[in-house]
Structures are given as structure tokens and as C-alpha cells.
Amino acid sequence: VVVVAGAGRGPLVAAVLRAASDRCNVKVHAVEKNANAIVTLRHRASTEDAWRGRVEVHQSDMRRWAPPCPIDCVVSELLGSFGDNELSPECLEPVERWTSTSIPQNYESFLQPISCARLWFDARRANTGLPAGPPAVGACIGAPPPDRGLETPFVVKLHNFAPLSAVQPAFRFDHPASEKSLERYCALEFPVAVDCTVHGLAGYFESELYDGVMISINPATFSTGMFSWFPLFLPFSRPVFVAAGSSLEVRLWRRREGDRVWYEWAVVGPDVLPVHNPGGRSCAMRL
């Protein structure tokens, strides 16, 4: 018995049925909350021979759905460009009690400093449509409101940019979870070989689907033909000059409060910049 959590219009359901076609009989519970997608799922379950009698469709939020029978495996596709930035950990947290077998089994995010003036200027010009937020805790009284575009992660297809140091790991999530908290923190130091101006951080991910089968947009382990995800870009509030032979030091937090999840990031060397997006004032994801 397999649960497809977040079935969409059915591509993962079809993949599960194909994988099991010559190996075993399988019963699939397709869980989806989007009303438009549910119409497609029910149509396919009633008209496609491979689905008929084998797929049961449930219109529900996966976090609140209760399986009608013991489950052998949960299959999901909730990954974002930074692994966890589409709230896969939060969505799968209540699902993990159903079974100890999950696809994917884990995912890890990675960061790399880059130079790309065009991308930084585009981020600065970006308008989120939100009013100026409150100052950060500890901010100077009378300080100007934050430039929201430079406190917002962007999914981008990188073209003319310069990677300035090797990719380093940031956050990791396992299913079933190995940690109770879904908040994360990392401190990274990137050695730089040449004089450069850093405009922000590029974010990537790797995921182990099951038993060593990987997908990746990490440049060091990139999966050939992978075009479903573009990198994440975390801009700095201003470009940072780093001299050859020195290092860029950054801090990154993944925060959660109530139904809000957000990232905060800061440069602590060689210059010190204020924390970006404190309290999720410019950008936060909602459950």
C-alpha cells in the first residue's frame, strides 16, 4: 500500500503503478487538496485501465488526512530549489507516523558565493508589493525601512555569473526525521582565491530518493538533464568586497513561528552586514 502525498494531477501515481507493474500488486492512495487537480485524478482513476480499482483518490490536506489502513510507503514531491524551501519538512512531519519508508529519504541544501551584478540590481529593483515592515529587533531608531528585494530569496536561472568558492552544505532533512526541530542554523566560511565582489549566495540541493538513487542541482553532482529546478539566490543588502586569500563568512537560519517559515542570513566577515529578513519581515512561507 502506497500513499502519494501531494498527488497533483497524477504523474507520481502513474510512476508508482509503472514501477510496481511487473513486481507486485499495489494499492495507491492519492492525497491532494487542490480541487482542480482532484477532478483530473478522479477522471484518471475511473477511465485509465492501469488506475481502475488500484487508485483511491482523497481530497484532503496531507497533514490532516488519516490513512484507512496500514501504509508501506509514502511517496512525495515537495522539493524546492533549496530542498526545504517549499515546506516539505513541515508537510511530511505528520505523515511520518504512517510508515518508516519514505521517498525521498533525505535532502540537503548547499550554498556558494557568487558575483553577478545584473542579478543583484534586479533583486534591488524587485517590488514585493508589501508596505515597509517594522525595524528589526535591535535596529537603530529612525533607520530606513528594509529594501525588501534584497531580503527576498529568488528562484533564478543563473547565466552570466562567477562562482567564487566551492559549494558547501547548509541544511539537511531526513524522513523519518532524525531531529525534532525543523529550525536550522549553519555558519559557513568560503575561502576566496582572487579579489572579488560578492553579490549574494546561490542555493542548491541534493536528494536521496531511495537506497542511493540521487537527484541533484548541486553543480558538483548535477543530475544530467535536470531542468525541473533552478537555483535559489540570496542577495546581500550591499555587495561585499573580498580580497584574494581571505574568506567570506556567512550565517544562515531557518526559522519557524506558528504557520510561518522563513530564512535569515548575515555576512560576518570580512565586512559585517545586518541580518537579512529578521523575523520574516520581507519574505516568509506560510503553511
Image (cartoon, helix red, strand yellow):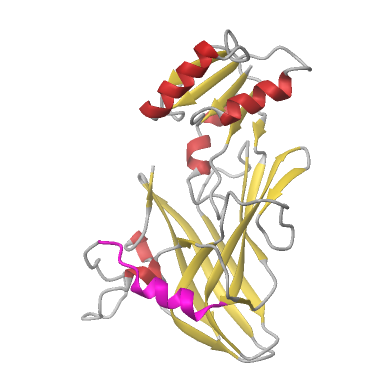
Which of the 4 image quadrants contains residue 144?
Answer: bottom left
Quadrant location of the C terminus in the rendered image: top left
Reply yes or no: does residue 127 show up in magenta. yes
Which residue is more in the foreground, 141 or 78?
A: 78
Q: Mainly helix, strand or loop, the magenta region? A: helix
Residue 67 visible to the viewer: no
Reply yes or no: does residue 81 show up in magenta. no
Task: Give coordinates of residue 32: x percent, y percent.
Answer: 45, 27
Q: Looking at the image, which residue is at 27% across and 80% down?
A: 140
Q: With respect to residue 279, does 4 lie above or below? A: above
Residue 207 visible to the viewer: yes
In this rendering, the count of numbered labels is: 0
**From the viewer's perspective, is 271 left or right of 131?**
right
Task: Give coordinates of residue 266: x percent, y percent.
Answer: 48, 73
Which residue is more in the foreground, 161 or 48?
A: 48
Quadrant location of the N terminus in the rendered image: top right
Q: Looking at the image, which residue is at 34% across and 68% down?
A: 126
Q: With respect to residue 106, does 201 lie above or below? A: below
Which of the 4 image quadrants contains residue 161?
Answer: bottom right
Task: Give coordinates of residue 44: x percent, y percent.
Answer: 51, 18
Which of the 4 image quadrants contains residue 29?
Answer: top right
Q: With respect to residue 201, does 73 lie above or below? A: above
Look at the image and give the residue range highlighted in magenta.
115-129
Task: Give coordinates of residue 227: x percent, y percent.
Answer: 61, 52
Q: Looking at the image, which residue is at 70% across and 72% down?
A: 166
Q: With respect to residue 89, does 151 lie above or below? A: below
Q: Looking at the image, which residue is at 57% across and 10% down?
A: 52
